[in-house]
Image (cartoon, rainbow, N blue to C red):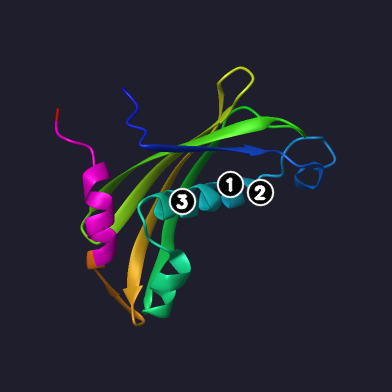
């Protein structure tokens, strides 16, 4: 499958993110994924905080995580994503790679839905911002 990445960011693994085995604790990957989605949102010109002030909150509805190659302290990771929309759900396909050898560390699918003033719905602002990034039929 040809990957459809539309955004990437780099991060460094910090020592306090590792467990006694010297590898990144599994829960830390959720932070990496969320940080990447927030950076992507900023790149589209939207602010998570400003959207919240207007009553628009994307919430995680489902996650599927596949751990592949462990990350260790001081590793540089590259977090990449692509996005699609299914109904009212935004599907983020996110992969994390170890920079030194480009090995896949984590593959994730994160499904988000928007709460508009507390009710499930479509966000026109998110739809407009994300539309240019949805995969085109080949």
Q: Secondary structure at mark 3?
A: helix
State the separation of the CA atoms marked 1 and 3: 9 Å
Residue at (82%, 35%) from the top-left corner?
Answer: 21
State the separation of the CA atoms marked 1 and 2: 7 Å
Is the residue under label 2 in contact with that under label 1 (CB below 8 Å)?
Answer: yes
State the separation of the CA atoms marked 3 and 2: 15 Å
Task: Report the residue that reaches farthest toward the bottom.
Answer: 117
The image shows residue 108, relative to residue 59, as above or below, that is above
Is the residue under label 3 in contact with that under label 1 (CB below 8 Å)?
Answer: no
Q: Earlier in the sequence, mark 3 or mark 2?
A: 2
Residue 67 drawn at (x, y percent): 58, 35
Q: Is residue 13 left or right of residue 96?
A: right
Of badges 1 and 2, nearer the viewer stands: 1
Residue 32 is marked as: 1
Residue at (61%, 17%) from the top-left corner?
Answer: 101
Residue at (71%, 38%) from the top-left corner?
Answer: 13
Of badges 3 and 2, nearer the viewer stands: 3
Q: Decide: few, some or many residues near mark 3? Use Cα within 10 Å; few <14, some 14-19, many ≥20.
A: many
Q: Quadrant for residue 82, please give it.
A: top left
State whether the magenta stretch is mostly helix, strand or loop: helix
Residue 5 drawn at (x, y percent): 37, 33
Q: Pointer 2: what residue?
A: 28
Q: Nearer the viewer, residue 24 or 46?
A: 46
Q: Secondary structure at mark 2?
A: helix
Q: Decide: few, some or many residues near mark 1? Use Cα within 10 Å; few <14, some 14-19, many ≥20.
A: some
Task: Report the residue that reaches farthest toward the top.
Answer: 101
Q: Is residue 36 left or right of residue 114?
A: right
Q: Pointer 3: what residue?
A: 37
Magenta segment, which residues?
125-137
């Amino acid at each position: 499958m040809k990957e459809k990445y539309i955004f990437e960011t780099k991060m460094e693994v910090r020592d306090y993110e590792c467990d006694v085995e010297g590898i990144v604790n599994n829960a830390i990957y959720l932070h990496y994924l969320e940080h990447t989605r927030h950076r992507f949102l900023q790149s589209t010109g939207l602010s998570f905080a400003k959207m919240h002030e207007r009553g628009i909150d994307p919430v995680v509805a489902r996650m599927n995580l596949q751990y592949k190659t462990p990350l260790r302290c001081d590793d540089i990771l590259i977090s990449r994503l692509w996005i699609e929309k299914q109904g009212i759900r935004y599907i983020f396909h996110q992969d994390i790679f170890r920079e030194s050898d480009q090995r896949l560390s984590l593959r994730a699918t994160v499904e988000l839905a928007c709460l508009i003033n507390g009710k499930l719905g479509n966000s026109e602002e998110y739809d407009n911002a994300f539309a240019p990034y949805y995969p085109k039929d080949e």
